[in-house]
């Protein structure tokens, strides 16, 4: 029994706070946090996950009752006072997981952090030229995890600077910062290999934090690796937003209905068509697929498919293997699933010439 008690005392207790307002598989904050937590548990930590949107946490009213009349105890009698703050105080490590809102943490997590005031004393001390309030007792180390829809890491600069300043005084410790840019595209099946590596690295970060209270440089490089070129990202995202606006759907509804972004120009078609093309279905030989568009968009482009890869170029090819002549809007209806490509061909809504056997591959999903 003594040995069992000793083992329990040595187990790291982690409190993971998810402040995302999203659920149902939509939250990239939750996705990243779940993998971080999974790694922590694999390393032997006891982790409790709390979803803050399910809790009642009233705003701090600045009365300082927790500093005077009832030292260490907040005047509010809500989930923070009754449950969350005691768990926070008992933890050996706390994870603050938040989507990036206006370059910093969201309001839900901010409310939680402001309600930690009872864990701090009202007195003033000076350390290395900085005045601060000392902690009342135990103040657990923190790791911050945040995701942003923007593809560049610079959008986390304000959040990082804020967190480092908050914890730059005695009694407080920031042991890790995990920032994942371009998170909104993490669900794309076209990026599965890279995203799997990001998530595997996030789990590794969890293991490292439990074992050493730090995250290695190599692991962080994998977590923050670029998923897509910024220009490509912007082009694809803009088409998606235009599609949502035109169809009158939210991003969540767009995902639930498995909708496809609808290109509105030759440039956006060149960008998006290769993503849905099953290049492997064309085999090992080189294939050139030519499109000639009619109607509102009169232009031409072609795709070179070879060894499972697709190259896109505007203009015409000297020797295409298959040529599709079609009104632009007809092919966009086919591309987005509003029309059946085979049926449209039967109705002669578009024409094809060349190696017609290649047509079957155009309608095979990647």
Image: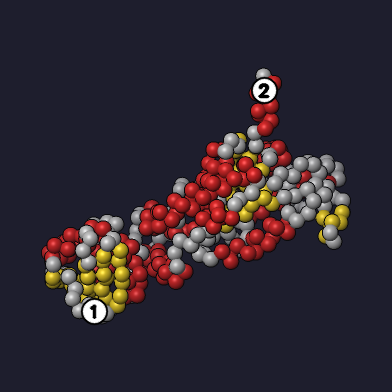
Residue 128 appears in the picture as rendered:
yes
Nearer-N-terminus badge (1/2): 2
User: Badge 1 is on which residue?
Assistant: 316
Which of the two residues, 101 or 190, is positioned nearer the viewer here?
190
Report the colour scheme.
secondary structure
Tell me where residue 43 appears, x and y as whole percent: 57, 38
Residue at the spot 73% in from the left edge and 47% down from the top edge: 116
Is residue 35 placed above or below 280 in the rendered structure?
above
Tell me where residue 91 appears, x and y as whole percent: 68, 39
Q: Quadrant of the C terminus?
A: bottom left
Q: Name the outermost residue toward the top.
A: 1
Mark number, residue 105: none
Kindly state the secondary structure of the residue where label 1 is placed: loop
Which of the two residues, 311 or 246, is positioned nearer the viewer here?
311
Residue at the spot 31% in from the left edge and 72% down from the top edge: 312
Kindly state the secondary structure of the residue where label 2 is placed: helix
Tell me where residue 103 appears, x and y as whole percent: 61, 63
User: Badge 2 is on which residue?
Assistant: 3
Q: Quadrant of the N terminus?
A: top right
């Amino acid at each position: 029994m003594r040995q069992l008690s000793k083992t329990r005392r040595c187990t790291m207790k982690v409190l993971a706070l998810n402040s995302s307002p999203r659920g149902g598989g939509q939250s990239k904050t939750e996705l990243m946090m779940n993998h971080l937590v999974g790694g922590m548990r694999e390393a032997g930590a006891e982790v409790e996950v709390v979803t803050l949107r399910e809790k009642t946490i009233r705003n701090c009213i600045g009365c300082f009752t927790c500093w005077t009349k009832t030292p260490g105890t907040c005047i509010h009698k809500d989930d923070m006072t009754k449950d969350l703050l005691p768990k926070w105080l008992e933890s050996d490590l706390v994870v603050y997981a938040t989507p990036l809102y206006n370059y910093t943490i969201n309001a839900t997590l901010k409310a939680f952090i402001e309600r930690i005031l009872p864990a701090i004393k009202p007195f003033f001390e000076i350390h290395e030229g900085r005045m601060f309030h000392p902690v009342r007792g135990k103040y657990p180390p923190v790791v911050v995890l945040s995701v942003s829809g923007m593809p560049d890491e610079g959008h986390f600069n304000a959040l990082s600077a804020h967190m480092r300043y908050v914890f730059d005084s005695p009694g407080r410790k920031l042991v890790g910062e995990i920032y994942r840019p371009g998170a909104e595209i993490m669900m794309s099946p076209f990026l599965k290999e890279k995203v799997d590596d990001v998530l595997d690295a996030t789990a590794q970060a969890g293991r490292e934090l439990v074992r050493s209270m730090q995250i290695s440089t190599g692991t962080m490089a994998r977590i923050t690796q670029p998923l897509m070129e910024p220009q490509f990202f912007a082009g694809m995202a803009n088409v998606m937003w235009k599609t949502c606006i035109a169809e009158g759907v939210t991003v969540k509804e767009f995902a639930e209905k498995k909708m496809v972004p609808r290109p509105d120009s030759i440039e956006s078609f060149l960008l998006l068509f290769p993503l849905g093309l099953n290049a492997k279905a064309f085999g090992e030989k080189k294939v050139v697929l030519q499109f000639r568009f009619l109607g509102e968009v009169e232009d031409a482009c072609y795709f070179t498919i070879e060894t499972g890869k697709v190259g896109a170029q505007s203009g015409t090819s000297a020797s295409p293997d298959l040529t599709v002549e079609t009104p632009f809007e007809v092919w966009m209806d086919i591309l987005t699933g509003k029309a059946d490509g085979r049926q449209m061909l039967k109705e002669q809504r578009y024409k094809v010439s060349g190696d017609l056997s290649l047509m079957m591959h155009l309608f095979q999903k990647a």
